[in-house]
Image: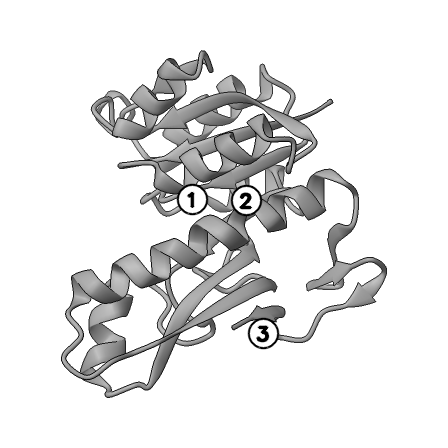
Amino acid sequence: MKKIVVLVSGNGSNLQAIMDACQQGHINGSLAAVFSNKADAYGLERARIAGIPAHAIEAAQFSDREAFDRQLMMEIDAYAPDLVVLAGYMRILSPAFVGHYQQRLLNIHPSLLPKYPGLHTHRKALENGDSEHGTSVHFVTDELDGGPVILQAKVPIFSGDSEEALNARVQHQEHVIYPLAVSWFIEGRLTMRDNAAWLDGEKLPAEGQSIE
């Protein structure tokens, strides 16, 4: 059975969605371990409750980003994962880390990429008067939130929406599409090559597959 390692920094709701999908047989793989850069991240507690090894590695212990990432890589590699999943992991990754897991490193970002890379995506969508917003699963490259998009889900923006309301609507879709993309990868249907995402041997468009 193929092995998945997940990196979290906070609540871990996407981690929970992936754990649930594994348990229900929707993902034909197993979670080998969960890592966080924050010892108090609730995602670690979710892993412990599920009997999954949970590890915290905090940046304060290291002289620089590269040293931190070297340690993280060493500890991840002890589990020999087939796939590494970023689920609300809020650290910029070093080029060495990204290169080490090239083509088997996924992230989910709360916008319809390439729109709104970085932080505060819900706020930006509201301030710009957008009529729709959403979330994207993508392969990770050295470009921040810039790797090939695999799957997107769109949500409407309603008059009077708050950031919290929009975030809840987006997260609901994240919990659907992230396990789906993970399952495609684990089944060997999803690959990255030529800086593009490919599903079942077909090159996906720049915006990936779309779920309304």
Within 10 Å of disc 2 (Cα), the crowding (few <14, some 14-19, many 20+) is: some
SS at badge 3: loop
Secondary structure under tag 2 reads helix
Residue 84 picture quarter = top right
Q: Position of residue 70 (x, y in %)?
A: 47, 27
Q: Going 25% across and 68% down the picture, which residue do you hit?
A: 122
Dot 2 or dot 3: first in sequence order is: 2
Q: Nearer the viewer, residue 18 or 112?
A: 18
Q: CA distance from mark 2 to mark 1?
A: 7 Å
The residue sitting at 43% across, 60% down in the picture is 144
Q: Badge 3 is on which residue?
A: 207
Q: Quadrant of residue 99?
A: top right
Type of colouring:
one colour
Residue located 44% across and 22% down the image: 71
For the residue marked with disc 2, what is the amino acid? Val
Pointers 2 and 3 in contact (C-beta within 8 Å): no
Sequence order check: which comes first, mark 3 or mark 1? 1
Location of the N terminus (image quadrant):
top right
Query: Which mark is on residue 98?
Result: 2
- Tell me the distance, in whole angstroms, between the alpha carbons under discs 2 and 3: 21 Å
Residue displayed at 64% across by 36% down: 27
Residue 121 image offset from top left, x and y in percent: 28, 68
Q: Are the residues flagged by discs 2 and 1 in contact, CB closer than 8 Å? A: yes
**Residue 135's quadrant in the figure?**
bottom left
Q: Amino acid at mark 3?
A: Glu
Residue for badge 1: 93
